[in-house]
Amino acid sequence: MSARPSAAISAASCAPSSTRRSDTPSKRQSHGRFARPAHRNAPFGARLHHPRRGHEIPFGLVEGRAPGPTLLVTAGVHGSEYCSIEAALRLIGRDPAGLTGTILVLPILNPTGLRRRSIYVMPEDGRNLNRMFPGKPDGTLSERLADWLVTTIYPRADAYLDLHGGDLSEALAPFSLFPAGSDASQALAVAFGLPVAVAAGGEGYTINAAGRLGVPSIIAEVGGNGVWDEAGVAAMTDGIDRVLQHLGMVPGPAASQDRPQMVTMWVPAAGTDGLWYPAREIGQPVAAGDLLGEIRDVFGSVRETICSRQGGFILYRLSSLAVNRGEALLGVGTPIPDGGS
């Protein structure tokens, strides 16, 4: 998991280091790799100096025959969230027939994390990219990547989907997050159609940084525990299709969809290292004061007891036995009284 000027993007403006392109009356697609950025003022997509050779970001571009909005889709911020990565990879091959505008896809922002099955962080600097925004032009790799996205990519988008899921050690029920107070982002979450939408606050996230630029943005969370399947990928691709209809980028009215349950989310973190014994399952209701779980040592002594600060239900939880201090243990979703309307 971890969460706006318009500009059409052409393959030429992306200037990939390697590109294969098909241009026929029904298809306008390209793909290749971006070199990771070394500094803020580098041109979009240029081959740049980077801290370790061979670190490049794959991209896909699907261009409609008529101008229109630009939808940015990213995945692989966390390299082991597989349903989201597979859905983004499939989006690159989408037939552009009937598409208005442009879809820009960055399907694996953390390619080393994908190869190494890394949990939460970019292996190059040990930091969680989805806590680094808006980034620094002269910081660590994750900070520079965040800065590049904020200064070079996000300003080109009219809407933004950041695809995620439970990491190798997380189980969850599907939900989306949108910046609290952004009606346009909330509308994207409603269009995407996952059962729960979290009005999220906090700093350091992809959708915060994009939101500050005026780009309606959501994080979509599907799958977890290192598992990907067709049902999980379909939940992502169906959501993307509904967003394209919502934005007017494909013909036809937006498919009718039940309105998500609007919630806020409280996430307790482990105060100590140890072994995690949860007391609640995904989707189970909780009341304020209920036991959520314990952290014990290897001999069974309780080192920390976690009780719910508020009522609601379990949206996700750490599924591994081992836990380290500071790691998120679970998320409690609390319904918003007026439904967020």
Image (cartoon, helix red, strand yellow):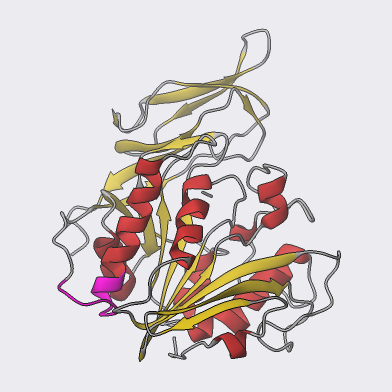
From this view, report whether residue 315 is shown above or below residue 298: below
Residue at 49% in and 42% down: 166
Residue at 69% in and 70% down: 145
- Magenta residues, start to end: 244-253
Residue 318 falls left or right of residue 190: right
Residue 214 falls left or right of residue 10: left
Name the main secondary structure of what is drawn in magenta.
Answer: loop
**Quadrant location of residue 310?**
top left
Residue 79, x across and y down, in percent? 62, 50
Residue 54 falls left or right of residue 227: right
**Any magenta on residue 248?**
yes
Residue 48, x across and y down, in percent? 80, 80
Residue 272, x across and y down, in percent? 66, 30
Q: Is residue 154 visible?
A: yes
Residue at 48% in and 38% down: 224
**Quadrant location of residue 28?**
bottom left
Q: Is residue 135 visible?
A: no
Which residue occupies the extreme top position in the image? 299
Residue at 51% in and 59% down: 89
**Quadrant location of residue 184?**
bottom left
